[in-house]
Image (cartoon, rainbow, N blue to C red):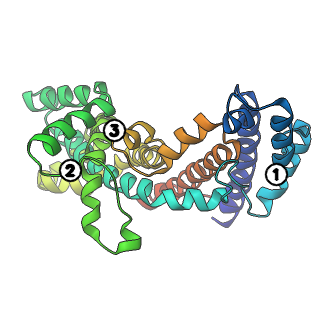
Amino acid sequence: MLSFIMRRGGGMIVSTFLVISITFVFMQLIPGDPADVLLGPNATPEQIASLRATWGLDQPIGVQYYRYIVNFLHGDLGESLFSRQPVLRMIGQRAETSVFLGIMALMVVVGLGIPAGVISSIRPNSWTDNTLLLVALAGASIPSFWLGLMLMVVVAGKLHLLPSSGFTSVLATGDLANLRNLILPAISLGFVNAALVARTARSSMLDVLEADYITTARSKGLSEWSVIVKHALRNAAIPTVTVVSFTFASLVSGAVVTENVFALPGVGSLIVQSVLKRDYPVIQGIMMVVAVLYVVINFLTDLTYAMLDPRIRYR
């Protein structure tokens, strides 16, 4: 296990370095100049050149890349070109909203997707199976922003059951009631992703239920509940865990549309604002944090495999 962790640690470092490099290159290819955006159309060439020199944007690409790598190795993701705040602090201020939204959306994904997939696999080709598959297909086809708008109109606008937008920090106020603002965004985001989890769970369960050891368990007189939960579900969990883990990463890092629809102060809305302003350090910093998130979740997922299946051993 130790050698596996060391190998994966080296792979994580290489992956992170590649993401840094690719992100830096793509940021340079984005059309537009942040100095132009900040100073406006009435700025003189001398003012633009002076501001570019202040930000270091007049330096050769190689120099800018080297400086960014060195700063990253020192734990410095740079400063925003516009707010002049440290990028890491800006991400940290927005991370709470995105993390809470991701966790709540994941609860919707797991709470709907896994039970739906298991129930469908128990009664394949029945009306229950066909109905759940139809719902899953509808969930995969409905855009999350449209579902979010419908929830805002019906649940928040007409029924007045939940807030429609905004979010106040739970960690700063200590008031868990603020999480009510994230229920509608979590449903709109989680319902769409639950469809993939449901289909994956159904497919895995169907394969496992046809295995010989399941037939043996039933021949021993075990109850159907015991066969499903203790034998089939655990062995079918590995593909589902893979989908769920990467779904969580995408929920935390990729809820750009949902956060903007519900006016949430999360990382997704920060990405949009930074792209519009050509705020390169913020965009690069967010991409860096997202890359690390995916790498860590991938590593934890591999360790989960060994916990679920004793046959998996890492050397």
Q: Where does the image place residue 50, in percent across and percent down from the top left?
A: 86, 41
Residue 79 lies left or right of residue 303; in this view the side is: right
Q: Which mark is residue 228?
A: 2
Q: Where does the image place residue 93, in percent across and percent down from the top left?
A: 52, 61
Q: Nearer the viewer, residue 123 or 274?
A: 274
- Residue at figure coordinates x 58%, y 34% from the top left: 276
Q: Label 1 crowding class (10 Å Cα cut-off): few <14, some 14-19, many 20+?
A: some
Under mark 2, the amino acid is Ile
SS at circle 1: helix
First reached walking from the N terminus: tag 2 or tag 3: 3
- Residue furthest out toward the bottom: 174
Task: Say if mark 1 contacts mark 3, CB within 8 Å.
Answer: no
Task: Say if mark 2 contacts mark 3, CB within 8 Å.
Answer: no
Q: Where does the image place residue 68, in percent across and percent down from the top left?
A: 81, 50
SS at circle 2: helix
SS at circle 3: helix
Separation (CA) of disc 2 from disc 1: 51 Å
- Residue at figure coordinates x 82%, y 40% from the top left: 52
Under mark 3, the amino acid is Asn
Separation (CA) of disc 2 from disc 3: 24 Å
Question: Can you identify the residue that label 3 sits on?
Answer: 193
Q: Is residue 129 above or below residue 76?
A: above
First reached walking from the N terminus: tag 1 or tag 3: 1
